[in-house]
C-alpha cells in the first residue's frame, strides 16, 4: 500500500507564508489522486479545506490555496493567522482506496 | 444536512469482536460510497475501509484485511463495520465518512478501546 508523506511539523510567523507538502511513495502526485487537504483542531473532526488539489469551498479562507508542485500536492497559507494553528492532513486516492498522510502540525508563532 | 451518527463503540478485550454502526441521513444513502476512518488517541487519521454504493466492492487498509468487514444496508441507511481479533493498537475513535461534491463529511465517531 502506498505511503503518503507530510512534514511532521512547521512553524510560521503571524502574517507569514508557509507551504505544506504531500508526497506519494508511488511517484508523483497527480490530479488523478484527487488530493484533499483537511484542517483539524483539538477536539474537532477534520474540516475539508481543499479538494481535487486546488478547489476551495465557500468556507475555505482565501489565504489558503492548493496546488500540484514538484510532484507533490501542496497547501500554501499566505498571511497566517493565529487561528490557523492546527493539524493539517492530506488525503490521496489510489483507485478508490484512500491513504492519509501522517499530518503536519502547524504552529503560528 | 448530511448527518452521520456512529454507535457500537465499547471496551473490549484483546481478541474480541465488535460491530460498529453508522446511521446516515440528509443525502441519498444508496447513491454514495462510504468509508470508515479511525484516529487513535493523539495520533493521525487512518483509512480503515470503504464500500461502493451497492456494496458490491469493498476496500480495506492492507494492515486490516481479514480482520475487519465493511457492509451496508441501503434499506436502513446504515453502514456497518464488523471487527474481529481486536488488538490494543485498534484502540481509536472510528468515524463514518461520506464524500459528497468535494466535501468529506465526518460523523463525530465512536470510541473503541481494546484492553484487558
Image (cartoon, grey):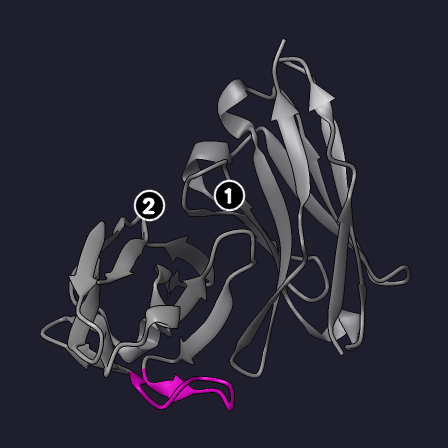
Residue designated by label 2: A1
| Few, some or many residues within 10 Å of mark 2 (<14, 14–19, 20+) | few
Q: Left or right: where does residue B40 sit relative to residue A10?
A: right
Q: Nearer the viewer, residue A93 or B54?
A: A93
Q: Given this view, does label 1 or label 2 mark the residue nearer the observer? A: 1
Residue designated by label 1: B39
Magenta-tinted stretch? A54-64
| Few, some or many residues within 10 Å of mark 1 (<14, 14–19, 20+) | some
Q: Where residue B60 sits in the image (x, y, percent)?
A: 51, 45
The answer to which image quadrant residue B25 occupies is: bottom right
Residue lying furthest top in this view? B116
Residue lying furthest right in this view? B75
| Above or below: residue B91 compared with residue B110 | above
Q: Nearer the viewer, residue B66 or A82?
A: A82
The overriding secondary structure of the stretch rendered in magenta is loop
Q: Where residue A87 sits in the image (x, y, percent)?
A: 37, 57
Q: What residue is drawn where x is 44% and y is 38%?
A: B42
Q: Where residue A8 sits in the image (x, y, percent)?
A: 22, 49
Q: Nearer the viewer, residue B75 or B86?
A: B86
Is residue A100 visible to the viewer in this orientation of the structure? yes
The answer to which image quadrant residue A92 occupies is: bottom left
Q: Is residue B12 magenta?
A: no
Q: What residue is drawn where x is 33% and y is 45%?
A: A1
Marks 2 and 1: in contact by CB < 8 Å?
A: no
Q: What residue is drawn where x is 48% and y is 73%?
A: A48
Circles 1 and 2 on the same subunit: no
Tally of numbered tags: 2
Q: Left or right: where does residue A17 sit relative to residue A62?
A: left
Amino acid at each position: 500500500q502506498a505511503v503518503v508523506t507530510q512534514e511532521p511539523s512547521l512553524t510560521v510567523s503571524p502574517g507569514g507564508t508557509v507551504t505544506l507538502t504531500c508526497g506519494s511513495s508511488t511517484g508523483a502526485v497527480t490530479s488523478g489522486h484527487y488530493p484533499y487537504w483537511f484542517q483539524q483542531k483539538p477536539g474537532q473532526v477534520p474540516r475539508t479545506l481543499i479538494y481535487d488539489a486546488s478547489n476551495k469551498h465557500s468556507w475555505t479562507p482565501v489565504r489558503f490555496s492548493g496546488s500540484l508542485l514538484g510532484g507533490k500536492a501542496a497547501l500554501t497559507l499566505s498571511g497566517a493567522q493565529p487561528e490557523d494553528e492546527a493539524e493539517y492532513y492530506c488525503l490521496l486516492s489510489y483507485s478508490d482506496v484512500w491513504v492519509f498522510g501522517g499530518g503536519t502540525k502547524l504552529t503560528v508563532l | 444536512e448530511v448527518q452521520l451518527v456512529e454507535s457500537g463503540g465499547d471496551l473490549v478485550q484483546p481478541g474480541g469482536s465488535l460491530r460498529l454502526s453508522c446511521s446516515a441521513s440528509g443525502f441519498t444513502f444508496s447513491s454514495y460510497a462510504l468509508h470508515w476512518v479511525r484516529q487513535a488517541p493523539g495520533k493521525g487519521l487512518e483509512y480503515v475501509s470503504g464500500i461502493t454504493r451497492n456494496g458490491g466492492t469493498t476496500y480495506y487498509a492492507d494492515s486490516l484485511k481479514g480482520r475487519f468487514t465493511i457492509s451496508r444496508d441501503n434499506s436502513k441507511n446504515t453502514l456497518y463495520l464488523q471487527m474481529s481479533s481486536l488488538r490494543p493498537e485498534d484502540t481509536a475513535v472510528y468515524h463514518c465518512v461520506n464524500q459528497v461534491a468535494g466535501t468529506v463529511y465526518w460523523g463525530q465517531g465512536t470510541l473503541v478501546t481494546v484492553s484487558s
